[in-house]
Image (cartoon, helix red, strand yellow):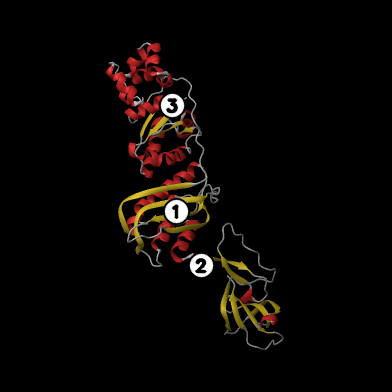
Amino acid sequence: MLWACLHLPDGDAAQWRALLAAWAYRYSSQVHVGYDDAVVLEIEASLRLFGPWPAFERRLRADLAALGLACRIAVAPHPRAAWVLAGMHDGLAIVHEARLANALARIPVARAKLEPKQAQALQAMGLRRLGQLFAAPRDALGKRFGPALLQHLDRLRGAPEALDAYAPPDRFDLRVELEWDVESTQALLFPLRRLVSALAAFLAGRDGGVQRFVLRLEHDRQGPGAHADTEVVVGLLAAERDPALLFEVARSRLERLDGTPRRAVPAPVRGLRLVADELPPFVPAARELFEARPAQSLPWEALRERLRARLGNEAVYRLAAHDDHRPEQAWRRVAAQRHAMPQPAPPTAPRPSWLLPRPMPLRGRGLVPLAGPERIESGWWDDGGLRRDYYVVETAEGQRAWVFRPAGDADAPPMLHGWFA
């Protein structure tokens, strides 16, 4: 087996290790977080899917750069060896045991992930590199430093090691502390993009999506300018995980905190936190093998969420059939819903695709009847009653129109109510 270690910078280990593990889970089913400052993953099986290690490494580094993480990466036949090597070198890949033994032998004791007191004592004894420890009498080392040191040395060279397997959590929670107080939403866009990119990587690792998440703007809770944290709820109609779409929607919500775009936040912001508790399965939109959509056009899902974020939830709606024979009452505006299926209209005679807001007289001669009359007599219960005879006619210009006359009055002038496509 081959193991890759992703070694975090000292200052970021506690903050980003869980995110790093969630992201790595998309590339390997064996991810372990047993080491304090690193994540290790088994990659031998992944190489068959993602290509040889140089290509796979470039892909990993591109993803890490998008996340804003700078990790040292090393590969070795054993997880603990990869961990120690990553603490020393970046980009080192060792696949053979003989080369691994030589590389480990040259590592200073101070950089071998030993207990600090043990490393100092060993250096005082003149044992400055791991090769010297490997060659030293085993019993003497065990008596002097205990079995933990021997166990560490054995696991570096391939002794079995029980590692806790990582399982993606059902909740995302990440916080960025700002270096100074921020007083405008524009200055929050950079940390927001980083949080949203981390969320998208987390979702991709667990093969899921997000339908609702909360941005929490942390303010000073004490002192004369104390202010409760501001919560910005970002809701979507369907589970999504595209980082560009999530960022665009979150940015639009953030910029409308006071109802107008690009204004100041309610109080100076000291930290930004993103919490996502609702993580439903991700169902990608159906795509054909040969995509006919132009490369620069915007998918409907992205456009819908962008409009809802910028204009408000009520500005985007769908049309639904209503059980009423009156043409003006046959459709209703309803709120856009996730996976909403269009309701079929009541079975009737053909209806025009363009219905006029108000009927108007149809001028001209030479109208040719094509269908009708169809009598619609309804609405007596709500003071909106009507009695009409509808016809489909063709005008002298070849247009197909939907017209009506008062019921039973064949001599009345026709009223235009719609056009057929």
Q: CA distance from mark 2 to mark 1?
A: 20 Å
Labels 2 and 1 touching (C-beta < 8 A): no
Decide: few, some or many residues near mark 3? Use Cα within 10 Å; few <14, some 14-19, many ≥20.
Answer: many
Pick whichever, 286 or 265, lies toward us.
265
Question: Which residue matches tag 2?
Answer: 314
* Image depth: mark 3 or mark 2 in front: 3
Question: Which residue matches tag 1?
Answer: 246
User: Looking at the picture, how far across and down is residue 402, in whole percent?
Assistant: 62, 77
Pick whichever, 395 or 148, lies toward us.
148
Q: CA distance from mark 3 to mark 2?
A: 54 Å
Q: Earlier in the sequence, mark 3 or mark 2?
A: 3
* Corner quadrant of residue 321: bottom right
Q: Amino acid at mark 2?
A: Glu
Q: Is residue 222 above or below residue 123?
A: below
* Corner quadrant of residue 254: bottom left
Question: Helix, strand or loop at disc 1?
Answer: helix
Q: Residue at x 67, y 82 (%)?
A: 385
Q: Residue at x 39, y 28 (%)?
A: 83
Quadrant where the C terminus is found in the figure = bottom right
Q: Earlier in the sequence, mark 2 or mark 1?
A: 1
Decide: few, some or many residues near mark 1? Use Cα within 10 Å; few <14, some 14-19, many ≥20.
Answer: many
Question: Which residue matches tag 3?
Answer: 79
Q: CA distance from mark 3 to mark 1?
A: 35 Å
Labels 3 and 1 touching (C-beta < 8 A): no
User: Looking at the picture, how far across and down is residue 206, in whole percent?
Assistant: 51, 42
Q: Is residue 122 above or below residue 230?
A: above
Q: Amino acid at mark 3?
A: Pro
Q: Earlier in the sequence, mark 3 or mark 1?
A: 3
User: Looking at the picture, how far across and down is residue 244, in whole percent?
Assistant: 42, 52
